[in-house]
Image: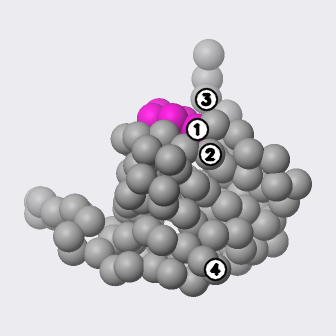
Amino acid sequence: MRIHNFSADGGRSVHAFGSDFTQVLLATAGEGAMASAMFLEPGGLIGRHEATTGQLLCVVAGAGFVSGSDGVEVAIEPLQAAFWEAGELHETRTDTGMAAIAIEGVDIRAHAPRN
């Protein structure tokens, strides 16, 4: 077993598409699959862009807003996740700050939770 630190201090600043967040790569796999931690400071933004693969954004701290191709914002908070299909335009923003784990790849599919 190995313990990995994935604090924002070890990440890279992302500014593509007008974004303002820090990304820390956690894991990669075939077909361009990857998992990363995303840290958005208050006022942070993952700018509107097209998903190249399926993308699942799992909020672990803070809160914010996500939108899909229709541009309609939906509030998101810890223990909620947003899923975008490949080709879908999407954006994430926060007023107060947010930390999330993003999982993306060609074969990523979201599953509805069991009740």
Name the residue type under label 1: Ile
What is the quadrant of residue 78 in the picture?
A: top left
Sequence-wise, the earlier of marks 2 and 3 is: 2
Vertical order, 42 against 78 (above or below):
below
Sequence-wise, the earlier of marks 3 and 4 is: 4
Name the residue type under label 3: Pro
The C terminus sits in image quarter: top right
Tag 4 residue: 17
Q: Count the marks.
A: 4
Tag 1 residue: 76
Name the residue type under label 2: Phe
Of the two numbered discs 1 and 3 in the rendering, the one whose residue sits closer to the viewer: 1
Residue 77 located within the stretch drawn in magenta: yes
Dot 2 and dot 3 residues touching (CB under 8 Å): no
In x, y percent, where is residue 60? 39, 42
In the structure shown, which secondary structural element does the residue marked by tag 1 occupy? strand
Mark pair 3, 4: CA separation: 32 Å
Read off the magenta span: 76-80
Q: What residue is at 48 percent from the left and 40 percent from the top?
A: 63
Mark pair 2, 3: CA separation: 21 Å
Sequence-wise, the earlier of marks 1 and 3 is: 1
Q: Nearer the viewer, residue 77 or 31?
A: 77
Q: What residue is at 20 percent from the left and 70 percent from the top?
A: 9
In the structure shown, which secondary structural element does the residue marked by tag 3 occupy? loop
Tag shown at residue 113: 3
Tag 2 residue: 65
Dot 4 and dot 1 residues touching (CB under 8 Å): no
What is the quadrant of residue 49 in the picture?
A: bottom right
